[in-house]
Amino acid sequence: DGGITQSPKYLFRKEGQNVTLSCEQNLNHDAMYWYRQDPGQGLRLIYYSQIVNDFQKGDIAEGYSVSREKKESFPLTVTSAQKNPTAFYLCASSMSDSGNTIYFGEGSWLTVV
Amino acid sequence: GQNIDQPTEMTATEGAIVQINCTYQTSGFNGLFWYQQHAGEAPTFLSYNVLDGLEEKGRFSSFLSRSKGYSYLLLKELQMKDSASYLCGRQGNLIFGKGTKLSVKP
């Protein structure tokens, strides 16, 4: 079945460590996005990519990094520079950045221990 | 970011009608989404408006006024399972509002 797969579902990070969240889609979508969601809050855009080998910062990019080497993959690295990384992370994709439904992955819970 | 405003919380009664409003900055606007999100789950698509007017889809309808930078989601015949957060999102660079937490009471 086509869709977006995020992994892992749950991840624990020690302070000072970098961790990478995986996002893979087989929908042949051009655009991919990463959002952060804190408890009881809305979605805040971290990074987005409209095409392979190109990406732009969202509202809260500090402490995060991404890559878009393949169309189907958009991994997010939470670096040690992100001082408060505990949150729910959602990956999404769409055919383009205008006029198409956005599909979300199931999300990844990151907790700092 | 580009401001998208919606009420933080709303409460309604089972069987009633509720309207959730959303206002947004109009510059660079390409369309507006509504998503439903249950706690701890991914958002699910409800509607997409790019032209002015009302789009009806079963119990849910969404309205858009581009000149006013205004949209609303209308939920009819409320059911307990409609208790969730409702996210308004602006197309262009996919910015979402903070969401409206709807509680449906018996």
Image: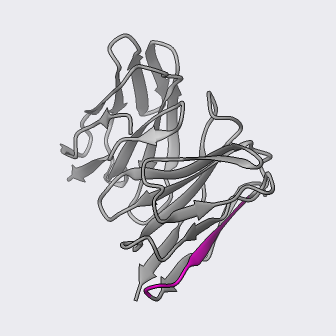
B106 with respect to A47 (left or right): left
Q: Is residue A7 visible?
A: yes
- Depicted A2 relative to depicted B14: above or below: below
Q: Position of residue A2 (x, y in %)?
A: 77, 54
Residue at 40% from the left image edge and 60% from the top image edge? A37
Number of numbered discs:
0
Q: Is residue A18 magenta?
A: yes
Residue at 42% from the left image edge and 27% from the top image edge? B61
Q: Position of residue B16 (x, y in %)?
A: 24, 37
Q: Position of residue A3 (x, y in %)?
A: 71, 55
Q: Is residue A88 magenta?
A: no
Between residue B25 and residue A55, name the one nearer to us. Answer: A55
Between residue A25 and residue A62, name the one nearer to us. Answer: A62
Residue at 31% from the left image edge and 56% from the top image edge? A41
Which secondary structure dominates the residues rendered in magenta? strand
Residue at 80% from the left image edge and 46% from the top image edge? A28
Picture quadrant where residue B96 is located: top left
Q: Position of residue A93 (x, y in %)?
A: 65, 47
B80 with respect to A58 (left or right): left
- Depicted B2 relative to depicted A43: above or below: above
- Depicted A31 relative to depicted A64: above or below: above
Quarter of the rendering occupied by the N terminus of chain B? top left
A9 with respect to B37 (left or right): right
Q: Is residue A106 visible?
A: no
Magenta range: A15-24
Q: According to the image, what is the colour scheme of the structure?
A: one colour
